[in-house]
């Protein structure tokens, strides 16, 4: 449904076998899952410690998936997509009656195009998205909402001439409008966005045509325009796949490098991005998402090179590895995480037995 990047490792795994849940000593515990074999979850958002909503996709040919978490169990929700195959990549909720999810769906002739859906507490409804002139395909990979009348979705588009450029759209509570973003070079894409208000959003992604030549990309929204930010380029390049902020001028972006096979973390101080030393697992890995509740606590999740779930915690001065609750012996990855408090996080992804969910109690 989208470009082949490190963030899609959880989606591209073979989904075949089942396994038994186990608990981890670090506070990560395997939790009930909402979907059967062949499904995956790629986004999650929480508005309280016990209330969350996750999105993803079913088996090939299935529709987009959504499910609500009440702290103990999941309730599946019906998502209506415009045409055929559809996947929801990210979701942002401001209350139990307000969420926006984005992703991609096939159009009338089978081309993958950007998708947005809104949850009003009762039902999901597709939203109309404008596309840049000459768009052949596109996708929104990340979304962040600061209120019921304010969201920004980010991703990429592919033109009729196969040029890949950034896609950013803004929701004002009634309709979506295209935003103008600066591009560094060919192959630019934004993977995730975090918004504090109508005048402050930070988005991250990558610039490059292949995984081995990608460079981290970051942009800042000030309420009027997007501007490029200087990132710290790691040796061997890399991508920033997730971002989370605990203030208007303090953020951490996470990702990885296909060339060096190492996890990547960068911190933003309001002016520049600086490299952090992530807790790189043996053999390497990739961090696909993070969630920060304060300057002294961020949780990042992903997949190591042994195809197992990966989690790390930032304590304000360093990254430390966490032991996760791998629910089976099959390939698996955590693709999204949401922390509502310092001792309440939920992470979702995919495994050989379908979707996986893990919770952390601090």
Image: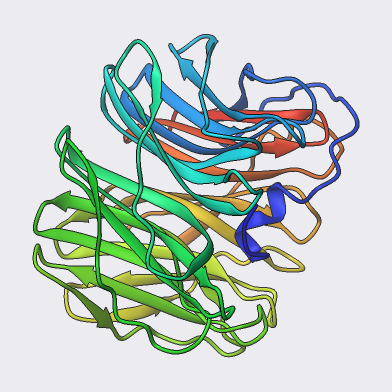
Write the residue at 78% across / 31% down. 38
- Residue 17: tell me if it is visible: yes
Instruction: State the colouring used for the structure image.
Output: rainbow
Q: Where is residue 353 in the image (x, y as percent from the top left)?
A: 81, 28
- Does 140 appear above or below 282? above
Q: Where is residue 12 in the image (x, y as percent from the top left)?
A: 76, 51
Q: Where is residue 283 in the image (x, y as percent from the top left)?
A: 77, 68
Q: In this view, does 65 lie to the left or right of 170?
A: right
Residue furthest to the right in view is 17
Rendering quarter of residue 214: bottom right
- Does 164 appear above or below 307? below
Tally of marks: 0
Write the residue at 77% across / 37% down. 60
- Residue 313: tell me if it is visible: no
Q: In this view, does 260 lie to the left or right of 337?
A: right
Q: Which of the two residues, 3 or 49, is positioned nearer the viewer here? A: 3
């Amino acid at each position: 449904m989208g470009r082949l990047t490190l963030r899609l490792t959880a989606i591209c795994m073979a989904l075949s076998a089942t396994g038994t849940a186990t608990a981890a000593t670090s506070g990560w515990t395997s939790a009930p899952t909402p979907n059967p074999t062949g499904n995956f979850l790629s986004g999650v958002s929480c508005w309280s410690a016990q209330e969350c909503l996750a999105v993803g996709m079913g088996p090939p040919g299935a529709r987009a998936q959504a499910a609500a978490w009440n702290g103990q169990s999941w309730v599946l929700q019906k998502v209506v997509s415009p045409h055929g195959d559809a996947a929801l990549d990210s979701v942002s909720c401001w209350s139990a009656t307000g969420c926006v999810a984005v992703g991609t769906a096939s159009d009338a002739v089978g081309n993958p195009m950007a998708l947005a859906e809104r949850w009003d507490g009762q039902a999901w409804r597709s939203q109309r998205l404008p596309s840049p002139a000459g768009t052949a395909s596109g996708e929104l990979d990340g979304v962040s909402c600061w209120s019921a009348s304010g969201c920004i979705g980010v991703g990429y588009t592919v033109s009729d001439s196969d040029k890949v450029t950034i896609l950013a759209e803004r929701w004002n509570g009634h309709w979506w409008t295209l935003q103008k973003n600066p591009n560094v070079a060919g192959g630019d894409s934004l993977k995730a966005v975090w918004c504090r208000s109508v005048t402050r959003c930070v988005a991250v992604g990558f610039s490059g045509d292949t995984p081995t030549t990608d460079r981290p990309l970051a942009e800042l929204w000030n309420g009027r325009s997007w501007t490029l930010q200087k990132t710290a380029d790691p040796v061997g390049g890399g991508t920033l796949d997730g971002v989370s902020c605990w203030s208007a001028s303090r953020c951490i972006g996470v990702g990885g490098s296909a060339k060096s096979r190492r996890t990547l973390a960068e911190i933003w101080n309001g002016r520049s991005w600086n490299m952090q030393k992530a807790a790189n697992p043996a053999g390497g890995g990739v961090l696909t998402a993070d969630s920060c509740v304060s300057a002294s606590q961020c949780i990042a999740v992903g997949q190591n090179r042994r195809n197992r779930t990966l989690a790390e915690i930032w304590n304000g001065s360093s990254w430390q590895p966490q032991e996760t609750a791998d629910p089976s012996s099959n390939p698996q990855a955590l693709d999204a995480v949401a922390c509502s408090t310092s001792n309440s996080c939920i992470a979702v992804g995919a495994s050989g037995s379908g979707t996986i969910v893990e919770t952390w109690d601090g």
